[in-house]
Image (cartoon, grey):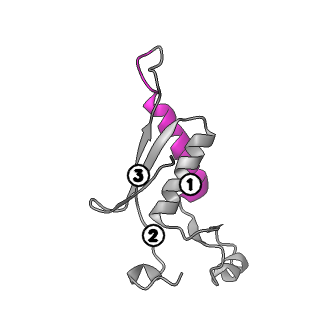
Amino acid sequence: MNHPGKCRNLHGHSVKASISIEQEQLNDQGMVCDFSDIRDSVEAFIDQTLDHNFLLHKDDPIIPMLIANKERFLALDEHPTAEVLSKMIYRHLKQSGFNVAQVVLWETASAHACYREN
């Protein structure tokens, strides 16, 4: 909402995520963790929360129309930017027990947003 550029129009993105996990020591198999465990956790979150969902700010005036038409949407406290989405994935991984260092979302080959704490 209220964005002055072309992103003010309703649109969607396909993104790629880069996730960094860190540990002080490697596990018994010489790994920080199994990549498939990260993938499974992120894919489940994306499938259940983000994929084929209309993400918008909680104050967006289109919400009543979406409700009236029984459309799927997710109203966020913040605008659904790549930065906010990377933070959502980061926090999901933290809650899932991963020692996540950062999450980077790539919207294009040259445009990305990164979220990390500390």
Q: State yes or no: discs 3 and 2 in contact (Cβ < 8 Å).
A: no
- Report whether residue 8 is seen: yes
Going by the image, does 36 lie left or right of 88? Answer: left
List the residue tagged with mark 3. Answer: 104
Question: Does the magenta segment cover residue 33?
Answer: yes
Give coordinates of residue 114: x percent, y percent: 42, 55
Task: From the image, state whether disc 3 or disc 2 is nearer to you.
Answer: 3
Query: Where 56 falls versus 32 (above or below)?
Result: below
List the residue tagged with mark 2. Answer: 12
Magenta residues, start to end: 29-50
Give coordinates of residue 117: x percent, y percent: 51, 48
Give the secondary structure at mark 2: loop
Q: Residue at x 36, y 62 (%)?
A: 107
Amino acid type at mark 2:
Gly
Query: Magenta stretch mostly in which secondary structure?
Result: helix
Query: Where 76 falls versus 4 (above or below)?
Result: above
List the residue tagged with mark 1. Answer: 88
Whole-Å distance between the Cαs marked 3 and 1? 11 Å
Mark 1 nearby-residue class (10 Å; few <14, some 14–19, many ≥20): some
Amino acid type at mark 3:
Val
Give the secondary structure at mark 1: helix
On residue 64, the disc is none
Whole-Å distance between the Cαs marked 2 and 1? 17 Å
Give coordinates of residue 69: x percent, y percent: 68, 78
Whole-Å distance between the Cαs marked 3 and 2? 18 Å
Give coordinates of residue 118: x percent, y percent: 50, 46
